[in-house]
Amino acid sequence: MRRYIPDLASRSVPRYTSYPTAAEFHDRVGVADQRAALDAVAPGTPVSLYVHIPYCHEICWYCGCNTGAIGRPERMAAYLAALGQEIDAVAARLRGRVVAVHFGGGSPNAVPAEDFIALTDLLRHRFDCAERLEIAAELDPRTLDRAYCDALAEAGVTRVSLGAQTFARHIQEKINRVQPYAMVARAVADLRAAGIAAVNLDLMYGLPGQTADDLTETLELALDLAPDRIAMFGYAHMPRLLPRQRMIDDALLPDAAARFGQSTLAHDVLTAAGYAAVGFDHFAKATDSLAVAAAEGRLRRNFQGFTDEPGEAIVGLGASSISQYAGLLVQNEKHVGRYRLRAANGGLAGARGIVRAADDRLRGDIIERLLCDGSVDLCDVARAHGACLGPLHGALGGLRELVAHDLVRVQGWRVTVRDEGRAYARLAAAAFDVYRQSDAQRFSRAV
């Protein structure tokens, strides 16, 4: 039974798609660090590529992604040319083997179909790619038709995620993303007819004007589409950092109690329908590779959320993309114009990031296992890192409140998030975060 504890549910904490988080990035990290990290990847090391497309045909007001309206077609052509230059520069150094490619955005299907095929061909020619290569793409169903689905299949795309968010028209109008259920259903049918069997849906709770009845209807319609995975994200309202969110009326947002109720409702409906709860915001069919990875302890967490990708490093390509190496997190230049200049002047575009010290790597592994598995043995992780347990004493003290509420159990050096505490897992992770800031405007609510 998930329990609503007002003080805990309303706290703001990172989503921990990395550790340290992007909030700790600084401009003292750049191309030289990026170059050294690429050179340090051993031959044959499994690597994932993340390709960022920073354009959409229309901007949604809730969106926190680095994206802008595409406008003139020439903008996309110029961006793809710069992306090609960066790919050439990275491929000249990277000796790892690419096992997965993820296209994010923005809207990757803002790229013309023939250019998308050419881009995937370029990746295969420039990098050493595994024979069985998973290529995933986040897509906007509003600009997706059967011809584009066929092009995705020709490009080798094996999995897609459709940004559905909600099927309630009155909410869609409030977030500037109107897409009738029939439109999304047609996109799912077209993708499957094209041979792309793995189709995921992204949904949201905590949206302006959203009620429990709205969410129930959306979930029921989503289940009719039988997606392989459903990501159930809580809307993070941060208008101070994201000006487009100022178009959303704060007064219409559900309060902390309503958000918690919606999160619980989604969990109950989806698990009752046979989906396995993966982490704190993903759900997958029991036969899906994500659910299998979770059951086998192979689940990972990175900038794409919970994943089963086996890459030991993530190489980001494109404006604002983030690369993740054992000892470094580095983000490309965010501004598209400046990114293009960097790509033209040597190819690499790293502009900010953070060097991951030994303690960062230790704590990052603890946080990842806690969020992915719901339990972690601090002794085992410390031993694997050749570290002592002393610095972690404070983290155990930071769990005291969660333990008192019977949401977390501490037995010796093993920390376990109880089923009742799954909704508060990010708070448990935050106990191990030495950079943590209690800035309500910077991070999303815990639930």
Image (cartoon, rainbow, N blue to C red):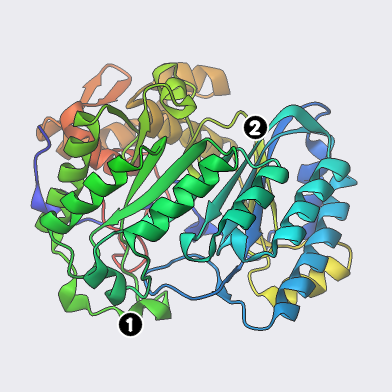
* Residue 268 badge: none
Residue 245, picture quadrant: bottom left
x 44%, y 16%: residue: 296
Q: Is residue 287 left or right of residue 22?
A: left
Residue 41: x and y, percent? 78, 35
Whether residue 244 is visible: yes
Horizontal arrangement in the rendering, residue 6 relative to residue 236 (left or right): left
Q: Amino acid at mark 2?
A: Gly
For label 2, count other residues whose C-alpha is less than 10 Å away and answer few (under 14), some (14-19) or many (20+).
some
Name the residue rendered at 41%, 79% in the picture: 244
Q: Which mark is residue 311?
A: 2
Distance of label 1 from label 2 (alpha carbons): 39 Å
- In the drawing, what numbered circle is on residue 247? 1
Coordinates of residue 172 in the picture (x, y in percent): 30, 69
Instruction: State which quadrant residue 265 falls in.
Output: top left
Residue 437 visible in this rendered orientation of the protein = no
33 and 212: which is toward the camera = 212
Q: Residue at x 76, y 60 (%)?
A: 115
